Image (spheres, rainbow, N blue to C red):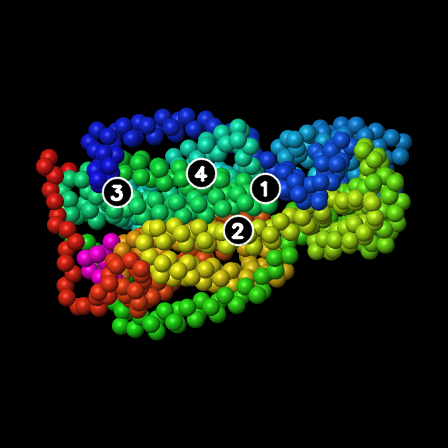
C-alpha cells in the first residue's frame, strides 16, 4: 500500500503534476519570503515574558518613558588631551547633532542650548555628548542610517570618535546582521555544493538537492512571514539566520538518504519510476521519523520563558516540516524526470552490484564484530573523558565587549569611557515604587555599591513614582548584575513600597534567569519526547534508551571539547574573543536541542535500516548490513550539516559562532564515532535483546559467516527499460 502511494507521486504523469504544484507554491510563497525581514522584531524588550521584573517596570513606565527611546553617546578621545579648540568644535557639533533623524525634541533642546551637554573626563583626554533617539517601533531598521549621519558630523582631527551607548550598540548589531541572510545562504550553499560534488562524484547530480533546498527555504520563509504577520509569531535576525542554515543542512541530509536509496533500487529495477517508488517506500519513513523528531523537539521550545526562544522553535519547526515535504515530493519528481544520466559518470546500471557491501563502512563493521563489548566500552569511556571539559563552561553570560568576535565601534567607545573615568549615563536602574515610599527608596539606593546618585522621583500615576540611578559597570557584565541584585534586595525590603527594579542591566539579568529556567525545564521535555518517538518508530524500549544515552553522551562530549576550543583555540582565530569558556546563558539549551534533535537523525537512519534487515538476517548481521548501506550517506550528511552550522562562525557574534562550532562538532561525533562505532558495537553485543519487548529477533541469531541472502529479486517494469 505504501509503495503504491509512493509510486503515485512519481508516476509518468504525476511527477509533472508534483512539479507544477511545487512551482506554483514556490512562486506564491516567494513573494512573502522576500519580506520576512519586515516582520522581524529585534527589540530586546520583546524577548522577556511579562512575569519578569524588568518587564513589569517597562509596563509601568510606558506612559511616562517611551520604551522606544534609545540613549546614545558620541565619545571623543585625544591621548594628549582635548584642547580648547577641540571642546569648542565638540560643542558646535552637538548643535548639528540636533538635526540628525530621530533625535527627540528634548535632546534637540539640550544640544542647541547655550550650554551643550559636553561631559569632559577628569583627566581632560576624553569627552562625550549624550542624546536620545526615538524612531518608534522601527528603531532597529532606522538606527544604521542615523548612525551614519552622526559619524559624518562628529569628527576630531588627530583624535578618535566613537558612537556608544544603546544607540551605538544597536548600530553595530544592525551592521553585524546586515545582509546576513543572503551571505549565509550563499556561503552555506557553496559549502554544500563542494561536499555533494565529492560525495556523488557527478558534475550535475548535486544541482537537484541544492535546488530543492532553495525551494524549501523559500516556501518556509513565506509560511514564517505569514505566521509572524497574522499569528503574532516572534521572528528576529537570529532565528531567520538559523532557519536558512537548518533548512539547507537538513534538506541536504534528507536528499542524501533518498538519493542513496534510489541508487540502490536502480540496480534492482529496470524502470526508474518503479525504482523511485521502492526508494520512497523504504526511505520516506526514516526521513519522516527524522523530521518529526526534529520538529517535535523544536516545538518543545514554545514552553520557554524567553519569547525569543519560544518563537525560535516554531520558526525552525516550520522550516524542517516544509523541507521534509519538498524532499519527498519535488526531489523524487525531479530525479525521475531527469533519469539515470544524472549519476554520470557512475550510472547505477540495472543488475549491477551494490558497492557499499564491500566499502569502507563494511570494513569498519568487520573490525568491530569480533570484540564489540571492548569497542563500545572504550569508546564510551573516551567520550566520558571528553565530557569533563563541560566543567570549564561559564554560563554566567557575555559582557558587551565579549558579544562580538571583533572590536566594534560601540565597544571601543565604552572602553574609552572606562579608561578615562567617565560613566556611561545610558545604563541605569529604574526603580518604580509607591510615591509615599520614594524617600526610603532613595535612601536605600544610596547604600548600594556601584550606583550613582539617584534622580528626583517622577510621578507615573496610580500613586506610583519612579527614579533612576546610573550603574557604574558594563550593561551586561556580572558586576552590573550584582548591582541590580543588590538594588532589588535593598528596595524589596521596604514595607508597603511595592518596589520593582528594571533598566538595561536588569533586562539582561532577567534574561539570564529565564534562560537558566528554560535549560532545566525544556531539556528533560525534549528527551522525553524524543524517547517516545523512538519507541513508536522502533517498537522497542531497550533500543530507544541506548540511542538516547549515546546522543546525550555525544552532547556532553561535544560541549566538553567545545569548552576547550573556546578557551584555548578560538582566541587565536578571532580578533576578539571572551576570556575563558564564557558562553551565553541560553547556549546549553540551543546546543542541546540542535544536537539531540539532529544527532538522533543519524541513529534513526541507521536503526530503521537495521530493523528492516533484521527481519531476514537477524540483528547482528542486519547491523553490519545497515552500517555498510547507510555509512557513506550518513557520513556525507553529517559533513554537510556540520559545514553548514560552521558557517554561523562567519557572523561576528560570539553566541552564533560558539553555537555553530558546538553543533558542528557534535554532529561529527555522532556520525563518525557514536553512530558508526558506539551504536554498532552495542547492537552487535546485545543482538536481539535491543528489540525488547518486541519479538523481532527472539532467536537472537549469532553472527554467521554464511553468504547473505538477497533481500528481494530484481524486477522489470512491464513497460520496458527506463
Q: Which mark is residue 280?
A: 3
Please provide percent x and percent y for residue 329. Answer: 30, 36
Q: Which mark is residue 307?
A: 1
Question: Of tags 2 and 3, which is closer to the observer?
Answer: 2
Measured in 3D between alpha carbons, the distance from the residue under mark 4 to the one under mark 1, in whole angstroms, is 17 Å
Q: Which residue position holds label 4?
A: 318
Is residue 546 visible in the rendered image? The answer is yes
Height in image: 141 above or below 636? Answer: above
Q: Residues within 10 Å of mark 3 (few under 14, many from 20)?
A: many
Specify whether 508 is left or right of 719: right
Specify whether 74 is left or right of 340: right
In reply to whether residue 614 is colored magenta, the answer given is: yes
**Dot placed on the residue nearer the N-terminal end, 2 or 3:** 3
Which residue is at 63% across, 42% downward?
49
Label 3 secondary element = helix
Specify whether 704 is left or right of 112: left
Residues under numbered marks 3 and 4 in contact, where contact means CB atoms less than 8 Å apart: no
Q: Nearer the viewer, residue 438 or 176?
A: 438
Q: Nearer the viewer, residue 580 or 677?
A: 677
Which residue is at 33% across, 57% downward?
540
Q: Which residue position holds label 2?
A: 522
Please provide percent x and percent y for residue 60. Answer: 75, 36
Q: Nearer the viewer, residue 264 or 187?
A: 264
Amino acid at each position: 500500500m505504501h509503495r503504491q502511494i509512493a509510486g503515485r507521486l512519481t508516476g509518468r504523469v504525476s511527477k509533472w503534476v508534483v512539479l507544477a504544484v511545487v512551482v506554483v507554491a514556490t512562486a506564491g510563497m516567494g513573494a512573502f519570503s522576500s519580506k520576512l525581514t519586515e516582520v522581524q522584531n529585534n527589540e530586546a524588550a520583546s524577548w522577556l515574558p511579562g512575569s519578569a521584573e524588568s518587564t513589569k517596570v517597562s509596563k509601568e513606565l510606558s506612559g511616562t518613558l517611551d520604551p522606544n527611546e534609545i540613549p546614545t553617546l558620541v565619545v571623543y578621545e585625544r591621548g594628549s588631551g582635548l584642547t580648547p579648540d577641540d571642546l569648542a568644535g565638540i560643542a558646535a557639533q552637538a548643535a548639528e547633532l540636533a538635526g540628525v533623524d530621530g533625535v527627540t525634541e528634548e535632546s534637540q533642546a539640550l544640544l542647541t542650548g547655550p550650554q551643550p551637554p559636553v561631559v569632559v573626563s577628569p583627566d581632560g583626554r576624553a569627552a562625550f555628548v549624550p542624546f536620545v533617539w526615538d524612531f518608534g517601533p522601527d528603531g532597529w531598521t532606522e538606527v544604521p542610517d542615523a548612525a551614519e549621519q552622526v559619524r559624518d558630523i562628529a569628527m576630531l582631527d588627530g583624535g578618535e570618535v566613537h558612537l556608544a551607548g544603546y544607540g551605538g550598540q544597536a548600530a553595530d548589531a544592525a551592521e553585524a546582521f546586515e545582509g546576513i541572510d543572503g551571505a549565509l545562504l550563499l556561503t552555506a550553499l557553496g559549502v554544500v555544493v563542494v561536499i555533494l560534488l565529492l560525495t556523488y562524484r557527478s558534475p550535475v547530480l548535486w544541482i537537484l538537492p541544492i535546488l530543492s533546498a532553495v525551494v524549501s527555504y523559500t516556501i518556509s520563509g513565506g509560511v514564517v512571514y505569514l505566521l509572524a504577520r497574522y499569528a503574532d509569531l516572534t521572528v528576529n535576525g537570529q532565528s531567520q539566520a538559523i532557519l536558512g542554515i537548518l533548512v539547507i543542512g537538513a534538506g541536504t541530509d534528507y536528499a542524501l538518504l533518498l538519493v542513496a536509496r534510489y541508487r540502490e533500487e536502480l540496480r534492482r529495477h529496470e524502470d526508474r519510476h518503479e525504482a523511485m517508488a521502492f526508494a520512497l517506500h523504504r526511505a520516506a519513513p526514516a526521513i519522516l521519523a527524522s523530521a518529526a523528531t526534529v520538529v517535535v523537539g523544536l516545538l518543545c521550545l514554545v514552553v520557554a520563558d524567553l519569547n525569543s526562544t519560544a518563537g525560535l522553535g516554531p520558526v525552525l519547526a516550520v522550516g524542517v516540516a516544509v523541507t521534509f515535504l519538498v524532499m519527498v515530493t519535488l526531489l523524487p519528481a525531479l530525479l525521475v524526470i531527469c533519469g539515470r544520466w544524472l549519476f554520470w559518470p557512475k550510472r547505477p546500471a540495472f543488475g549491477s552490484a551494490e558497492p557499499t557491501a564491500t566499502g569502507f563502512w563494511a570494513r569498519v563493521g568487520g573490525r568491530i564484530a569480533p570484540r564489540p563489548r571492548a569497542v563500545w566500552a572504550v569508546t564510551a569511556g573516551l567520550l566520558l573523558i571528553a565530557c569533563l571539559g563541560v566543567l570549564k563552561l561559564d554560563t554566567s553570560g557575555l559582557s558587551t565587549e565579549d558579544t562580538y568576535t571583533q572590536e566594534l565601534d560601540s565597544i571601543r567607545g565604552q572602553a574609552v569611557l572606562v579608561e578615562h573615568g567617565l560613566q556611561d549615563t545610558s545604563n541605569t536602574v529604574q526603580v518604580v515604587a509607591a510615591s509615599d515610599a520614594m524617600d526610603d527608596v532613595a535612601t536605600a539606593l544610596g547604600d548600594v555599591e556601584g550606583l550613582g546618585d539617584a534622580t528626583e522621583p517622577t510621578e507615573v500615576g496610580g500613586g506610583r513614582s519612579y527614579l533612576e540611578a546610573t550603574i557604574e559597570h558594563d550593561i551586561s557584565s556580572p558586576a552590573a548584575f550584582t548591582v541590580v541584585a543588590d538594588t532589588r534586595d535593598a528596595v524589596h525590603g521596604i514595607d508597603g513600597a511595592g518596589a520593582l527594579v528594571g533598566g538595561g542591566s536588569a533586562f539582561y539579568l532577567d534574561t539570564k534567569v529565564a534562560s537558566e529556567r528554560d535549560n532545566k525545564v525544556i531539556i528533560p521535555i525534549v528527551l522525553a519526547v524524543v524517547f517516545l518517538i523512538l519507541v513508536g518508530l522502533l517498537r522497542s524500549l531497550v533500543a530507544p534508551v541506548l540511542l538516547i544515552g549515546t546522543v546525550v553522551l555525544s552532547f556532553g562530549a561535544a560541549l566538553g571539547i567545545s569548552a576547550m576550543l573556546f578557551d584555548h583555540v578560538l582566541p587565536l582565530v578571532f580578533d576578539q574573543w571572551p576570556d575563558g569558556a564564557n558562553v551565553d546563558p541560553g547556549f546549553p539549551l540551543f546546543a542541546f536541542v540542535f544536537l539531540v534533535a539532529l544527532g538522533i537523525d543519524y541513529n534513526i537512519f541507521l536503526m530503521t535500516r537495521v530493523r528492516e534487515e533484521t527481519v531476514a538476517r537477524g540483528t547482528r548481521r542486519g547491523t553490519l548490513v545497515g552500517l555498510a548501506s547507510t555509512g557513506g550517506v550518513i557520513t556525507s550528511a553529517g559533513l554537510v550539516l556540520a559545514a553548514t552550522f560552521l558557517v554561523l562562525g562567519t557572523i561576528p557574534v560570539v553566541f552564533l559562532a560558539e553555537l555553530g562550532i558546538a553543533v558542528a562538532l557534535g554532529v561529527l561525533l555522532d556520525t563518525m564515532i557514536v553512530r558508526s562505532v558506539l551504536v554498532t558495537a552495542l547492537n552487535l553485543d546485545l543482538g536481539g535483546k535491543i528489540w525488547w519487548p518486541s519479538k523481532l529477533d527472539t532467536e537472537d541469531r549469532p553472527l554467521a559467516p554464511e553468504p547473505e541472502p538477497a533481500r528481494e529479486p530484481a524486477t522489470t517494469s512491464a513497460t520496458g527499460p527506463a
